[in-house]
Amino acid sequence: MASRNISVSETSRPKLPRHAKLKFDETRQVWVILAPERVLAPDEIAVEVLQLCDGVRSVADMVDMLAEKYAAPREAIAIDVVAMLQDLADKGFLTEARESTA
């Protein structure tokens, strides 16, 4: 399997790859990312960030939204969000939107 890892930066427009879905598991009452032969249960903050990963918003846009929502220092949020998204990308749970959006 070829590696398609992305390098996440504030200009990235991350999204879940076609094979992965963010869903609420009613039985366990938790959000999960479902991928072939893998399940990941992200924490509450990660779920909030993942729900913003639509392939349209840039990481910078997400960071701005979260900094405003939580009245937190943008710099601190940027570091945490980029690190979290990079970790998910390295594990194959995120990809980047292509330039031509149809």
Image (cartoon, rainbow, N blue to C red):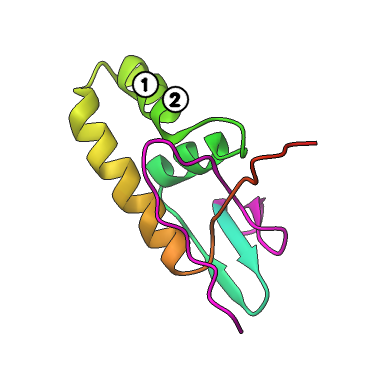
- Residue 34 visible here: yes
Q: Determine whether, in the image, residue 4 is placed left or right of residue 10.
A: right
- Asked where in the image residue 66 lies, by quadrant, the reply is top left
Q: Residue 86 at x, y = what percent?
A: 38, 56
The residue labelled by disc 1 is: 64
Q: Residue 13 at x, y = what percent?
A: 53, 40
At 53% across and 75% down in the image, what residue appears? Answer: 3
Q: Which of 30 and 66 is in front in this view?
A: 66
At 22% across and 21% down in the image, what residue appears? Answer: 72
**In the rendered structure, which segment of residues is drawn in magenta?**
1-30
State whether residue 85 is above or below residue 19.
above
Q: Which of 99 and 13 is in front in this view?
A: 99
Q: Quadrant of the C terminus?
A: top right
State whether residue 18 is above or below residue 57.
below
- Residue 28 visible here: no
Q: Residue 99 at x, y = what percent?
A: 64, 41
Q: Nearer the viewer, residue 79 or 2?
A: 2
The residue labelled by disc 2 is: 61
Q: How busy is the neighbourhood of tag 2: few (under 14 within 10 Å), some, or many (20 plus)?
A: some
Contact (Cβ within 8 Å) of mark 2 with mark 1: yes
Q: How busy is the neighbourhood of tag 1: few (under 14 within 10 Å), some, or many (20 plus)?
A: some
Q: Determine whether, in the image, residue 90 is placed left or right of residue 26.
A: left
Of helix, strand and loop, which mostly describes the magenta segment?
loop
Residue 47 is a magenta residue:
no
